[in-house]
Amino acid sequence: MIGRRSLIAAAGGALAMPAALRAQPLFSRPIRFVIGFGAGGAGDITVRMLAPHMQAELGQSIVVDNRPGAGGIISAEFVARSAPDGHTMYLLTTSNMAAPAFFRTIPFDVTKDFAPVGRMVWYDHVIAVNPQLPVRDLTELVAYAKAHPNQLNIASISVGNAQHLGVELFRAMAQVPMTTVTYRSTPELANALATGEVQVAGELLAPLLPQVQAGRIRLLAVTAPSRFPSLPAVPTSAEAGMPDYIVRSWNAIVFPANTPRPQVEAMNRAIRRALAVPEIRTRLIELGGLPEPSSPEELATMIPQEVAAWGRMAQLAGVQKQ
């Protein structure tokens, strides 16, 4: 009897093994969330705001890993070459869409080397100035720059990202003799603009808001089709004198290509539930973001379309590939 019971118990354990394996969590260790920008930028602000809610949904901690430089190429390559096991993900942004327009060679294919998870937030760009500059809209800025050739510096962060391309497009469309100056991070750019080290900047609205609210920076225009909800007094680029100048950014999450579908779906749910928290939505809008999550399929369709669109913008701006 003892022998039979032992055999039955062993058989039962063998039958139970697959169920136990299936019950194992999708994420077995901390998840590395790689960002291609320094701390304090729009993407960094968004990620750090959403991470606690996503952690609660996933049952695993999220470690933010800032890796600025080269328009996001270094950080994106790191993730593209990481193991597709769901424990390394990347904050994909419009800078990754713009990079092919700036660089002759990129060590990965943004349309093939990632598994799309979902878009998170749209971010409008702005043209901002030091408050001492005697201009109140884009028309006055263009006139002043032409009257003072090569005396104004216009700032962006990094080289080869969406903000940089937005600045070069502005210079080309306005035909103004300004000098582009790049900074490693948004806080550095904001401080340079506020102190007068540079007079003009093209940047995302979100990370500049504290300086704007403190009166250290003045916004001339939001470069979007409509005014931003929390800044009804700031005109659009069309209203400020440049109707064809529209530049917007977004961010999303991707895994390395071939990451298992269950982990993709779990992370997409985590994004949606975090963005659905009323306090998060309200705070993001206050900070200059417009929450709008997507499915993995929608993001997969959007990526090649955005690469093509930013490529056309680069041609208009006269960007020469490096």
Image (cartoon, rainbow, N blue to C red):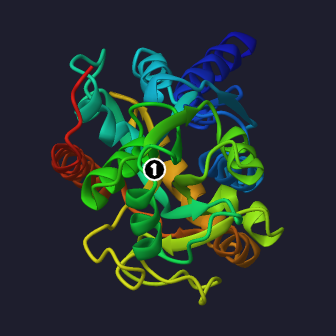
> Residue at the spot x=76%, y=37% of the render?
61
Q: Mark 1 packing: few (<14 Cα in 10 Å), some, or many (20+)?
A: some
Say whether residue 110 is left or right of residue 64: left
**What percent of the width, then of the height, locates residue 290?**
54, 71
Visible in this render: residue 276? yes
**What percent of the width, then of the height, locates residue 43?**
60, 48
Visible in this render: residue 248? no
**What percent of the width, then of the height, locates residue 136?**
56, 77
Circle 1 is placed at which residue position? Answer: 265
In the displayed image of the protein, which residue is found farthest to the right? 214
Closer to the camera in the image, 231 or 176: 176
**What percent of the width, then of the height, locates residue 26?**
58, 36
Say whether residue 73 is left or right of residue 211: left
Quadrant that contains the C terminus: top left
Closer to the camera in the image, 262 or 79: 79
Residue 277, by quadrant, is bottom right
Q: Amino acid at mark 1?
A: Glu
> Residue at the spot x=71%, y=43% of the render?
192
Helix, strand or loop at label 1? It is helix
Residue 150, by quadrant, is top left
> Residue at the spot x=47%, y=19% of the render?
74
